[in-house]
Amino acid sequence: MSYSKIVISIVHSRFFPLYLLILTSLLMSFDRPAFAGEITGFVATESRIFPRSPLAPVQKGTGVSLALQPEYYHDWANGTQSVLFVPFLRYDQHDGKRTHFDIRELYWQWVGSTWELRVGLRRVFWGVTESVHLVDIINQTDLVEDIDGEHKLGQPMVSFSWIRNWGVINFFVLPGFRTQTFPGVDGRLRFPVTVDNSQVQYESDAGEKHIDWAVRYSHTLGNFDLGIAHFSGTDREPRLLPGRDENNNEVLTPVYNLIDQTSLDLQYTIGGWLWKLEAISRKTRKQRMTAFAAGFEYTFANIRNSAIDLGVIAEYLFDDRDPNNFYPTAFEDDIFLGTRLGFNDVQSTELLFGAIIDRKNRSSFLNLEASRRVGSAFKATLEIRGFVNLDNSDFLYAFRRDTYIRVELRRYF
Amino acid sequence: MFNSKNYSPQQFQTTSHAVVLESTKSMQWLLVVGLTFWTIMALPLLGWADSEKSAEERGLAIAVEADKRDTGFGDFTADMTMILRNRHGEESIRELRTRTLEVDGDGDKSLVIFDMPRDVKGTAFLSFTHKVGADDQWLYLPALKRVKRIASNNKSGPFMGSEFAYEDIASQEVEKYTYKFLREEIYEGQEVFVIERYPVDKKSGYTRQVGWVDKDHYRPLKIDFYDRKNALLKTLTYHGYQQYLNKYWRADEMRMINHQTGKSTILKWQNYKFATGLTDKDFNKNSLKRVR
């Protein structure tokens, strides 16, 4: 897309960090500018600290990064029609691939009494589980943003929702494919060999112009929340094949297959219990794979009148994919154990700690996320992501020296 | 295939049922006549009978009357500003918008949209309150575009860090409490009933609440909340009542003071609009995702 090329060329200019630093400081220090219409959003400054030296000497260590995500919203015709525009920009001190621009959302929405129509770039979330997001397939993952798979690229689409008493049916037509982002050679949290996104291959002859489609039925029946969906089109997860770049360096080239995926997401809510299930069956021309995540979250609310909520989460992850034919997964037969603390204080202090442990080789991914509001417009976040006890057969083995601490300060405007 | 052996007993049952019905009807007739007679005879005594009701019955009757007077509003929208104040007088502001739909025969449906603080802007909370049993609650998280069904056992916890618990701001259904009439008195120049109510739900943060309800309009003027140890925890007072649609009373301001921590929250209501034409369709997971 040409807009991203223009923006990226600005982003890569010599003085860009200076421009962005000035812009960031301005946004951090002043109040909301007096624009017409509704402009909100955030600007964030982040530091990622890698205590251990990298695998490859070219990979950098601790660095800083800035991000900006404004949001413009305007509606008319009594709110039945609206536009939303959410561009996103990140500048990373070390990794040129992590420095990136994306239009997260830019769409027009028209709402009737029993239907909704949306045209443009959007983000759509499906699913219920906490540790993995198997059924969430509409958007491509923005992997350089975060390895948690919760950051997504804007997906071009026409989507229509039909809202009835017996449930909601969503239809999606998805023209224009977005490739998964991967860290560059200087970056951390990458494979020993980097992924070369300039050599993307598609199974479809139409390449990135292949038109994908999806349909989803969702409904609430008493204590059950249910979603059944089917997606047909280009897989969001590429296979990574060994290859060479133009300088004859070893690289991984992404290959995107055509797939059909049927999914189910289900939650049963009773008292303090949330019982969750996500399951997918994905089929390429050659092979079928199945994966599911199932478990619960139980909340001990307002413990001893301290206002504190303590949640206990356990999920079992299963995935039978053949890494030769699919994007590899680290979670073939794993257990996720987590705990969530909500302090329910004025600053909305929250803490989430979890570990995903491979049942066979005990390779573990640890995750701690803590956040707290500062004043009325700032939010501070601390994240620690740890890779421990990694077995050399595990997919995460590539990240064995990439345990990191991330500190972010965000200003909302 | 029809089998005559099976068919005939059914016919017999139908006939005997009709006979039973006939005799029930005549019994009912007698009962109605009898009751009417005794009611007419007893009319002059009703004033006496009222005070001879048990304190529990009188308490319930007041709650039922208050509920009756607030029934039929249909729907309303309003803006809320919460001013949270800690012991040192430091303030923190929350701004919310709320939409409420009355549901025949069950608790209200409501949607709360968060505008301030800015980090939670766009977050929306949908709840279906039920007269009996747990409420249904969903939360929309705009950063992830995710709707989460959440556990509703947190009713005693604070709402947005304020001194209002979820159960304080939820739709107040008669069935959620049992009642006891305490006394009549004058509160700030108005004649009031003082009643006590006891939460049915074991998950409630209170053993009891004492409410001052004005005799003219059955509006709550003040509520004392007693914690699980039966110690006075909070006091809520209502200020600036205004009448909407010539019937429904809403306070402009609600002040909650926590006696145990010294913290307080002022909840200001603005822009009350009734009969806005909201329907069921504005209160589902789909509409939750697109509220602004």
Image (cartoon, coloured by chain):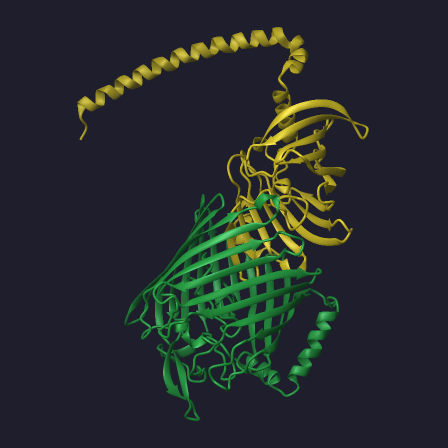
Q: In this view of the protein, which residue sits in the foreground, B217 or A142?
A: A142
Note whether residue A76 is visible. no
Give the camera-side residue of B57 and B230: B230
Q: Is residue A89 above or below residue B42?
A: below
Above or below residue A241? Residue B164 is: above
Pick whichever, A72 or A289, lies toward us: A289
- Rendering quarter of residue A39: bottom right
Q: Is B55 or B30 nearer to us in this picture?
A: B55
Query: So how many labels did they put on this image?
Result: 0
Image coords of residue A73 (percent x, y) = 63, 64
Q: Where's the C terminus of chain B, which quadrant?
A: bottom right
> In the image, residue A379 lies at what x, y percent?
65, 63
Q: Where is residue B197 in the image (x, y as percent from the top left)?
A: 63, 29
Left/right placement of residue B84 relative to residue A114 reads right
State which chain is coloured yellow.
Answer: B
* Residue occupying image coordinates x 73% and y 39%: B251
Is B264 displayed left or right of A121 in the figure? right
Q: Can residue A365 be seen in this view?
A: yes
User: Split into 4 quadrants, where in the image is the N terminus of chain B?
Assistant: top left
The image shows residue A154, relative to residue A79, as above or below, that is below
Q: In x, y percent, where is residue A136?
A: 44, 63
Q: Which residue lies furthest to the right in this view?
A: B189
* Residue at 43% over, 13% down: B25
- Give the residue at x 42% y 72%: A396
Q: In this view, does A207 lie to the left or right of A310?
A: left
Chain shown in green: A
Among the 4 quarters of the image, the one containing residue A241: bottom left
